[in-house]
Amino acid sequence: MPESRHNLRDIYPPTGPELTAKSWQTEAPLRMLMNNLHPDVAENPHELVVYGGIGRAARTWEDFDAICASLRDLEADETLVVQSGKPIAIIRTHTDAPRVLIANSNLVPEWANWDHFNELDKKGLMMYGQMTAGSWIYIGAQGIVQGTYETFAEAGRQHYDGNLTGKWILTGGLGGMGGAQPLAAVMAGACCLAVECDETRADFRIRTRYCDEKTHSLDEALALIDRWTKAGEAKSVALIGNAAEVFPEILRRMQAGEPLPNGRPDIVTDQTSAHDPYRGYLPAGWSVAEWHAKQETDPKAVNAAARASMKVHVAAMVGFWNAGVPTLDYGNNIRQVAKDEGLDDAFAFPGFVPAYIRPLFCRGVGPFRWVALSGDPEDIYKTDQAMKELFPENEGLHRWLDMARDRIAFQGLPARICWIGLGDRHRAGLKFNEMVASGELSAPVVIGRDHLDAGSVASPNRETEAMRDGSDAVSDWPLLNALVNTASGATWVSIHHGGGVGMGYSQHAGVVICADGTPEAAKRLERVLWNDPASGVWRHADAGYPEAIDCARANGLRLPRILG
Amino acid sequence: MPESRHNLRDIYPPTGPELTAKSWQTEAPLRMLMNNLHPDVAENPHELVVYGGIGRAARTWEDFDAICASLRDLEADETLVVQSGKPIAIIRTHTDAPRVLIANSNLVPEWANWDHFNELDKKGLMMYGQMTAGSWIYIGAQGIVQGTYETFAEAGRQHYDGNLTGKWILTGGLGGMGGAQPLAAVMAGACCLAVECDETRADFRIRTRYCDEKTHSLDEALALIDRWTKAGEAKSVALIGNAAEVFPEILRRMQAGEPLPNGRPDIVTDQTSAHDPYRGYLPAGWSVAEWHAKQETDPKAVNAAARASMKVHVAAMVGFWNAGVPTLDYGNNIRQVAKDEGLDDAFAFPGFVPAYIRPLFCRGVGPFRWVALSGDPEDIYKTDQAMKELFPENEGLHRWLDMARDRIAFQGLPARICWIGLGDRHRAGLKFNEMVASGELSAPVVIGRDHLDAGSVASPNRETEAMRDGSDAVSDWPLLNALVNTASGATWVSIHHGGGVGMGYSQHAGVVICADGTPEAAKRLERVLWNDPASGVWRHADAGYPEAIDCARANGLRLPRILG
Ligand SMILES: NC(=O)c1ccc[n+]([C@@H]2O[C@H](COP(=O)([O-])OP(=O)(O)OC[C@H]3O[C@@H](n4cnc5c(N)ncnc54)[C@H](O)[C@@H]3O)[C@@H](O)[C@H]2O)c1
Ligand SMILES: NC(=O)c1ccc[n+]([C@@H]2O[C@H](COP(=O)([O-])OP(=O)(O)OC[C@H]3O[C@@H](n4cnc5c(N)ncnc54)[C@H](O)[C@@H]3O)[C@@H](O)[C@H]2O)c1
């Protein structure tokens, strides 16, 4: 770890209604960059790591400082250009152009692998941007709760008549995103047993009320699950252990007919950082300390051992699947690694997107989110209320907002996420802008989304797995999404490679727009929050999904070759 | 070849001062798309192929028609989104946004290979955009003449004291770009022997005055070269033959001490379409007819045979290099194929960019070009004159413009290219805009460039080969270039994958802007034609090239981490 990547400073974004930059259009990215490194938000802020293994917000601390200084100084017709977390240039553009343009971790395909990336990363030439880490719209584990909740709830609908009471979910990983699993499971009505090797990660989830209990003993964990499922109580337990050891052991017990709650887990998934075998996955039989040490001294050995363990881990998941247990890959590329390691049926069980998410994408529905730049939770509660009034008929949304307010502790700047689609997003954006203009909210809000959205990602093992027309790997779509959002006047736009599934396996784009209460912002909000979800609808319409074609027609999209 | 890719229509762009679309901002891409398929411009217009093997302007004829219809209908605040040659959506943007946004041939890296591309292409899901084919700013072989001329002239400076009189250049390929070689050689003062297997291609070059003579006999070709070099006359001959057979034979004669003009070629290079072994390279021993037939019936056999021949071809080039002959790869990826085929020293000789072009890129100097939408050659002659007045001190530019006017026949809409850099490009653009406004030019002009430019491409075997800091494969740069040009208000912007070096080996961006004579266009021209070359300067400054850092400082670029 070069010195310039380590620092003991704690970063807190400015809050309140006073500007520290020259306008809200530049204050917004400044606060959001800093918020990404807030001690309650980032997984490892002193090393600039926001989430997902090594997903960083800036390349080095010097780069972080230079980005902040540049943003504080930026004029209303200037744009900051950021290359893999390093601020490169300040250029003259115009007021309707983005204030920041970002490209992270992009490599020419033939060189788009971990070895080459690591070489460049070590030389200080690159940074891993993950999805929302390097594009400054990560909002802590809440961001992922809604997606995970939607997924578990949909699995419950498909497999258990919509009722997960008394059921339990087996998973691995309580990191930046995986930490949302116990809470999402509980919100969806199920119990959760989450295997996590790093006790500090489990402690963090318990401290932030995302997980209920912690134990070092598999027997104790299963006893708790047994008690809760029998009582119909939705609760969660973190088991400190290695998923590559625990999953096969539970499968063994199941196959041997040994006692197990419900005789088997009701849903199986995993969110270890398998996308990064060098840093994200503890090999079976290793201690965490040994793992961290060897990451520095012998990364090749870590890689080899982690990959071998993933094969065992996935083999156990295939075992559950073959026994009829709903099993899903949660987008960490673990099936691909197992397959590369020689597990032929690694892709026996599906990814969560084709199984549960794609029908939403066809309508441009995805992880819409917003953040109160004021830092005041009241601003979010007011927007929660506004959303309910704006969409009185959307019961799921109302239930979600109530549960979220009750169960989700804010991390860093208060934020909210809810999955809405084309036709609704721009209405929410315009409403928030009015609330800023009228003073109902105490400061502007930013509106963004995960890169995992309908039109913003090409990732054949995850978001675009098994597309109807076979266009899984076509990455024209996310690149066009970035160009469209730039042309529509978003506040910042990003193009990333890698992310959750790792080097070589995805390209995706991010967008954030600031509702500062001005009429100019309203125009931009209307364009961006229409065109961005529309790009998801037309991407799926072009692939031949009837739901997407219907949605396009219903919303009057002009698609020359699709609607004629 | 699906029916929708074949058509006997001849396409000619509208000319003159009357609009066929709603404004010049949409008339411009319309005329330029059509110009790309003009019978005098495109290599195979009936199959939509502009140049470079299968580089197309639109995916199918239906797509071409739909793009034209969309452009004719497009309003001043609307944008057409094009995905791999298919018009997807018409969206609301604003007047300072691009009118067309294009992404061609982009694939997620792990799938970014010819096999997967061909599968998608066959299914009708993709199109190969090459560089300026799918981005509608190809201007026929003239576009490449200047680059080739600059390269040969620089080779002459480095190896022959700036005097190529009596020297001869051995090369292969007289296709869309390679056809410029004989003329560029002659303009640089040298003779040229170009091996071309397809007689129709050679005939086309002779008809357009790019090549002087044609023969089927190697002995006759060498006799002509011998006569011309002895007489100090700069002339060129096309030899109908296979480079994989002719190069080794000339090497053999040289090594055996048999008679050869000057005892050896003075420069060796190649421009067969080696980047595409399925369609671009005739295997040794095959007839052209057999080759075309097998492309349909047995593409795998073609691929294998072509690759084997390329190995022989490159081995001969390495032989010349080892004998002290200046030898260069002209960006067709032939060294990579030979290396993959087991030729260990395939990269013994350099690519043309690090050898001759990079110092220009450090100052943002690259293939600036413009086209008279009027169709009137007089408009170009007036801009030639204006360029001379604008840059009175640039002798090279004056010499080039005089020779170009004398020797280069226009193809399609009259166009001009000249390599100028940061600080000069926007002055040229503003001048042309004034000339449109004053009526001196009879209609607007468009201004663009090749994707092979200072800041717009990542291509480790070509434009970014052997970068000083090892950042050859970092493709954040071309993606940022596209975002910057979109944010600056270019008329159309494109992001491509593949191109001259083939699938997996490059990512690059294109930009075109229309000078319609309005004050609004002037503002956009100033921004785009400053920021676009500036992106080349900062990309090279970030890589540590002192010339680029000096250029950035001299031009007052604001580069927070580079200039401090
Ligand atoms: N949208 C999506 O598709 C999506 C959503 C959530 C997560 N993911 C993927 O899931 C993975 C996890 O994301 P994250 O942000 O939580 O990463 P993270 O690195 O913050 O957390 C991973 C956690 O797994 C633990 N872990 C590693 N190896 C283990 C093992 N063998 N047994 C038990 N625990 C182990 C680590 O200690 C860490 O706490 C990533 O690959 C991410 O891309 C994808
Ligand atoms: N900027 C650059 O880096 C640059 C510039 C010019 C050309 N190139 C590259 O050079 C190649 C040629 O480009 P193009 O547009 O002229 O392509 P093209 O396909 O139009 O022409 C290639 C020509 O080579 C001929 N040919 C194929 N195999 C042959 C063989 N074995 N012997 C003799 N002739 C053979 C073909 O008949 C054809 O005329 C491409 O790979 C292109 O990318 C790169």
Image (cartoon, coloured by chain):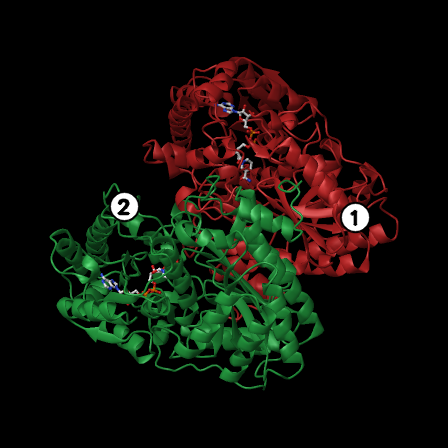
Chain colours: A green, B red
Q: Position of residue B408 (x, y in %)?
A: 71, 32
In this picture, residue A234 sits left or right of residue B445? left
Q: What is the chain identity of the residue bearing mark 1? A: B
Q: What is the chain identity of the residue bearing mark 2? A: A
The type of residue carrying mark 1 is Trp
Mark 1 crowd level (few <14, some 14–19, many ≥20, 10 Å Cα): many
In this picture, residue A564 sits left or right of residue B105? right
Could you confirm whether marks 2 and 1 are on the same chain? no
Quadrant of image for the C terminus of chain A: top right
Say which mark, if any, is on residue A346: 2
In this picture, residue B99 sits left or right of residue B553? right
Quadrant of image for the N terminus of chain A: bottom left
Q: Position of residue A380 (x, y in %)?
A: 52, 79
Which residue is drawn at the image coordinates 61% and 17% (left, top)? B214
State ligand 1's quadrant.
bottom left
Element at badge 1?
Answer: helix
Q: Nearer the viewer, residue B514 or A378?
A: A378
Q: Nearer the viewer, residue A159 or B463?
A: A159
Q: Is residue B231 above or below residue B35?
A: above
The type of residue carrying mark 2 is Ala
User: Where is mark 1, residue-wise?
Assistant: B24
Mark 1 Cβ inside 8 Å of ligand 2: no
- Between marks 2 and 1, how big is the CA–CA gap? 55 Å
